[in-house]
Amino acid sequence: MEDINLHFTGDFHAITSAHNLLSAMIDNHVYWGNELNIDIRRISWRRVMDMNDRALREIVMSLGGAKNGFPREGGFDITVASEVMAILCLAENLSDLERRLGQIVIGYRFDRSPVYARDLKADKAMAVLLKDAMQPNMVQTLENNPAFVHGGPFANIAHGCNSVIATKAALKLGDYVVTEAGFGADLGAEKFFDIKCRQAGLKPDAAVIVATIRALKMNGGVKKEDLSAENVEALVRGCANLGRHVANVRKFGVPVVVAINHFISDTDAEIAAIKDYVDRLGADAIVCRHWAEGSAGIEELAYKVVELADGGQAKFQPLYPDETPLFDKIQTVASKIYHAGEVTADKAVRDQLKAWEEQGYGNLPVCIAKTQYSFSTDPSLRGAPEGHVVHVREVRLSAGAGFIVAITGEIMTMPGLPSSPSAERIFLNDEGEIEGLF
């Protein structure tokens, strides 16, 4: 566990290095004469690091005189938000990786024409840095079952799925493949269906929505410190959140089963209430005790997933067709998945989307960056809100990854640390073992 959650195989370091190599080559090109006529005011490529550091969100670079280059504004994103991360997770092979890296738009010339990573001759060296990181990492569970752990684009700010290579390798090796699309089905599942499945030609046969009684009680208004106490009334109120997720996934033509991730504080009355609610939705809710019992505690769910997958019920289709205009795609996700009443954006955002359509990017899917704590852009608005406003404050082109990022609300592509960061509680004990990681 510690290895996976720290440095693991070095994949994140490779992605960070490849991304920042391109950043360095941009400023180096400008320093040595700017043959490509890059307008430094319109350089859109930021730097990344695998650390939450809000102080680096917006910075001024190249201070200190002519020897250090031309001063300009820039900033850092977290590595999981890097387009290079998305490219690694969506590329089919090494040649596709290099092609996608070359398609990265780093900014614009004075005549407003785009500048690509291949124009800077950075794509091939970036691919070399990513050569080993492109290989899926196979690990094993405590019961010796194989699992691929590859890639890490967070679903609240990126497309939220493991690599296409790992998924397709697993499909060749196993009879059934379960893949994660996390941070809420309104984010991870939507992006899995609309981005990854669309690009990779995948057609899922079933979906498992994981729920906890604790989370549903929080959606029903219970404070975090009171979640261990039985509260069936609050649970029933919070089930509206689960019902929304079930309905959303069904919109993609995929049958659903609900997995109740069991906690020791869950009571029989609460379990019965959630089962009754899901039953009224025409689905099954199955209690899963794998945390305590391993595979034996999740056997019933496994059989149900097999039943759904083999039942031929799935008629998968993405939420919107390729030819839908970009802003309409954002509105479609916001209305059909978030149940928003309106999507707003400044004129500059709308004009940018139209410009990208004119440049040939109008067929790309959209990747909406939004809080994972709510269907709305307000993380404190729990349950299943209706009619809220989704404001798109910024859009970014990820031409190599093959999608448009729409940043909403207060979501940040470079997070900050909380008032009491986990680092304060992580340490090496006297035997040299890591403690406090969770």
Image (cartoon, rainbow, N blue to C red):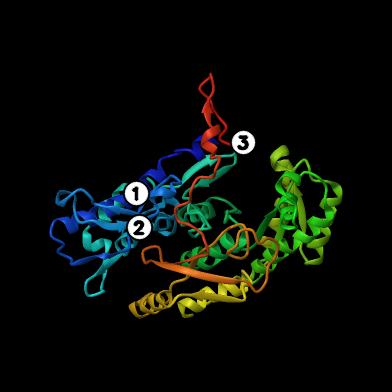
Q: Nearer the viewer, residue 431 or 134?
A: 431
Circle nearer the viewer, 3 or 1: 1
Residue at coordinates 23% horizontally, 51% vertically from top-left?
62
Name which quarter of the figure residue 336 lies in: bottom right
Name the kind of residue labelled 1 in the image.
Leu
Mark closest to the chain's N terminus, 3 or 1: 1
Circles 2 and 1 in contact, beta carbons < 8 Å: yes
The secondary structure type at the circle numbered 1 is helix
Residue, disc 2: 97
Q: Mark 3 is on which residue type?
A: Leu
Q: Are marks 3 and 2 in contact (CB under 8 Å)?
A: no
Mark 1 nearby-residue class (10 Å; few <14, some 14–19, many ≥20): many
Residue at figure coordinates x 60%, y 74% from the top left: 335
428 vs 104, nearest the viewer: 428
Residue 97 visible here: yes
Q: Which label belongs to residue 272?
A: none
Residue 235 horizontal/vertical position (percent): 79, 56
Q: Circle 3 sits on which residue? A: 142
- Give the label on residue 130, or none: 1
Q: Please, which residue is most extreme toward the left here?
A: 33
| Residue 47 placement, left or right of 260 | left
Label 3 – label 2 distance at C-alpha = 33 Å
Q: Which three-letter amino acid code belongs to the residue tagged 2?
A: Leu
Residue at figure coordinates x 45%, y 54% from the top left: 165
In the depicted view, which residue is nearer to us: 151 or 270?
A: 270
Element assignment for label 3: loop
Rate crowding at label 2 as few (under 14), some (14 to 19) or many (20 or more) other CA atoms within 10 Å: many
**How many angstroms separate mark 2 from mark 1 (CA)?**
9 Å
Q: Is residue 421 above or below residue 280?
A: above
- Disc 3 from disc 1: Cα separation: 29 Å
> Dividing the image into 4 quarters, which one contains the C terminus?
top right
